[in-house]
Image (spheres, rainbow, N blue to C red):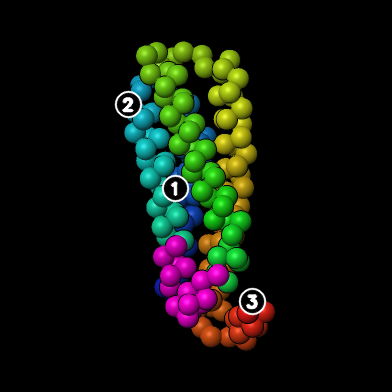
Amino acid sequence: MLVSRYQPILYLQYFLLVLDLVFNSFNEMLRFENVILLVLYVIQDVCIVFAVIVVFLLFFNTFIFQAGLVNILVNKFRVAISVTFIYFILCVALHVWGMTLRWDDPNIYIWDVTGYLVLHVFQRTVAVLYYYYYKRTALKLGDPRFYQDSEWIRKEFERRR
């Protein structure tokens, strides 16, 4: 893909990652009003879905996908796709549980609920993996080898037969 064409997409992907990081970092500071927190959670979840859509649109744009060799592409990015979907599920679960716990009283202390604390720590740990694999995938999809016929694609195809 041309650098001038891929650069705005890469910036969009970085923006979505930074936005998610900001939401994860500062959402507890905005818990004084349930509606504000709910809107931020919805925006964060929509941004994650949008980030996945951007990656899949890049997949659809590759030569490998257009040649019908989807299994090569899926195998190459299997971990990144899995981590992204696990992260999304953990975010939604954490957001729903957190809003359920503090809907009646936004200032209630919820950190003594063991399951919620475990989910929170697990979600934040998977978030680090998500940031790493998403950025790695975004950078790998900028490689021109994915957008033209090349020898490594033929070798991969022959190896998978």
Q: Are marks 2 and 3 in contact (CB under 8 Å)?
A: no
Is residue 60 visible in the rendered image? The answer is yes
Q: Which of 137 and 78 lies nearest the eye of the viewer?
A: 78
Residue 66: in magenta span: yes
Residue behind mark 3: 160
Above or below, 71 relative to 12 = below
- N-terminal-most mark, 3 or 1: 1
Residue behind mark 2: 35
Residue 131: in magenta span: no
Q: Residue placed at 43% from the left, 70% from the top? A: 60
Amino acid under disc 1? Ile
Tell me residue 81's x, y (percent). Answer: 54, 56
- In space, the residues marked 2 and 3 are separated at their CA atoms by 51 Å
Q: Which of 14 and 112 lies nearest the eye of the viewer?
A: 112
Residue behind mark 1: 48
What segment carries the magenta color? 56-71
Tell me residue 152's x, y (percent). Answer: 63, 82
Considering the image in quadrants, where does the C terminus appear?
bottom right
Check disc 3: other Cα within 10 Å, few if <14, some if 14-19, many if 20+: few
Q: Residue placed at 41% from the left, 24% from the top? A: 99
Above or below, 52 relative to 90 = below
Element under disc 1: helix
- 34 lies left or right of 26: left
